[in-house]
Amino acid sequence: MAETRKLAAILAADVVGYSRLAGSDEDRTLARLRALRSDLIDPAIAVHNGRMVKRTGDGNLVEFRSVVDAVRCAIEVQNGMVERNAGLPADRRIEFRVGIHVGDIVEESDGDLMGDGVNIAARLEGIAKPGAICLSEDAYRQVKSRLDLAVSDLGPTKLKNIAEPIRAYLLDVGVPSPTKPAPHAEPTTPEQRSMRLALPDKPSIAVLPFQNMSDDPAQEYFADGMVEEIITGLSRIKWLFVIARNSSFVYKGKAVDVRQVGRELGVRYVLEGAVRKAGDRLRITAQLLEAETGAHLWADRYDGKLEDVFDLQDQITEKVVGVVEPSIRQSEIEHSRRKRPENLDAYDLYLRALPHMAPVMPASAKIAAGFLENALKLDPDYAAAHAFLAWSHEICFMRGGYDEAEKIAALRHARSTIASGTDDATALAVAAFVVAWLNREHKAALSAIERALSFNPSSATALYWGALIHAASGNLAPATAYANRALRLSPFDPVAFCAHSALGHVAILERRYDEAASHFANAVQANSRLSTLFFLHAAALALAGHVEEARPIAKQGLELEPSVRIGELFDYALFDRVLMGKLMEGARLLGLPE
């Protein structure tokens, strides 16, 4: 079985006293847990770019690409539980305890996670108080500057089956931190004030020279060349302001504080890294930080051989650019949430809409539409707002009763985006999906995807939607290539389900039904609120001969969308007649309503 070793943030959670709750009223407890998962837990995981690895009864194991995302998700869930438990007697409250650790893990080929990183998170959860969050020292170090909660240092703690004691910290959700002393005032001489640059009107980043940690001076050129490639790649993201090489390289060879860099270059984010050589192998580490606080938003490492230096540079550049874009977008969403309503501009309103698109269901899409319509009032030519408003109307049409007005509005906004001449790769990709899905304009859609990738070859969004459009059009080779590349670039992307679905479509057309079912299961794991994915998974299982295994999965889809008609859903969602015919065959084996 193939496995991958990587660095990740792991969140483990379970229900305190679950056996007692289930023993007193099992049906009610299970119903409440299902409601919490669909209304609170799964949406929070999706918004904070998490991946549900597995559920074990009352427990959850979730993977995040950063500790910041993991802690934000945990706080959101725990705060939500405080509201939901208000007024309930103590013996009827559902309370979670959470453990979070960042460390080395092993990912199996089926997506399961193993290793000390997982074990430590699970043991930390076991020592957390009800309603609290327990962090390892490694996790706490990355988020401590962002916490406004009371924190208790538990000191070095012996955890079951963990060889060495782990220093642990307990966060009491709902209890504010003690007032911090005011920081020393910064010098404000005229010369020093002139060094402080104002932030530009869009997200901004500086890429610092990577440190050469090897004894080999030749790696200095490799590190500098890679940074130049990353700067070029980030510059293709049109909504991002990227500091030029000549400015960021003045810090080469200097020990600097990212806060100082942020002030002197006028940027909100800083990317830094290092290169190490051992024999014929290189290890490159990179981390994205928020300049104002120094907090880590993302970190990873990459290993490769020196056989082809330029190829290795290209591979690492593509991966870094692909993951930095969604990381910054998520941080920008958090910034917009902290702004007062009267201070919101069109970009802020657009950012506030994005989390409501993640469920891909009508109720949340209508909330997003409100933000996007207000954004267009402020900026009528805002291509990204047009594109996502088109998608919100598509969701309401496909899952809200096939109201023709929704379809007309969706196509109007999508065509406006494509015709606008925008160089926003994300906007073009979303608009391409809408015209493809609602009107089978797949040539125009794929042309828009190509345009998007010409502007930003590392746009995971364009690759995700492109994979789905290619698959539904019967273009199997590009569908597979796009899907695999997108998952490599941004595995926790909110639309990662598109790649898994595309790979499932390809497997169906090639009559590999068991593999198709596995891909659709991954799609469900990536977005457990989208009913279509359950129907696709169930249909693939039925085609593979696993009808009884498929029935409860189909039932879950019907619980999400009781009025669905599979024939209408698949007819709109799929261009390839052979693909639709096979999936309808699977649906009929299960007796799903046509």
Image (tube, rainbow, N blue to C red):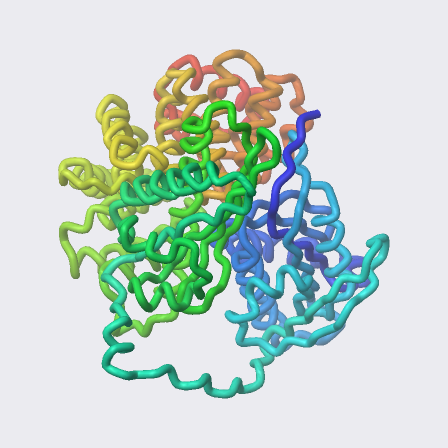
Q: Residue at x 27, y 23 (%)?
A: 442
* Residue 80 visible to an observer of this rendering: yes
Q: Residue at x 70, y 49 (%)?
A: 117
Q: Residue at x 40, y 33 (%)?
A: 464
Q: Where residue 331 sits in the image (x, y, percent)?
A: 41, 58
Q: Residue at x 41, y 28 (%)?
A: 310
- Which quadrant holds residue 551? top right
Q: Is residue 587 above or below residue 336?
A: above
* Quarter of the picture holding the N terminus: top right
Q: Is residue 281 left or right of residue 106?
A: left
Total numbered badges shown on the rendered structure: 0
Q: Is residue 349 above or below residue 224?
A: below
Q: Is residue 545 left or right of residue 419?
A: right
- Which quadrant holds residue 21? bottom right
Q: Is residue 273 left or right of residue 231?
A: right
Q: Where residue 275 sits in the image (x, y, percent)?
A: 51, 43
Q: Is residue 30 above or below residue 294?
A: above
Q: Where residue 12 sits in the image (x, y, percent)?
A: 68, 54
Q: Where residue 295 sits in the image (x, y, percent)?
A: 49, 63
Q: Is residue 16 above or below residue 360?
A: below
* Residue 364 visible to an observer of this rendering: no
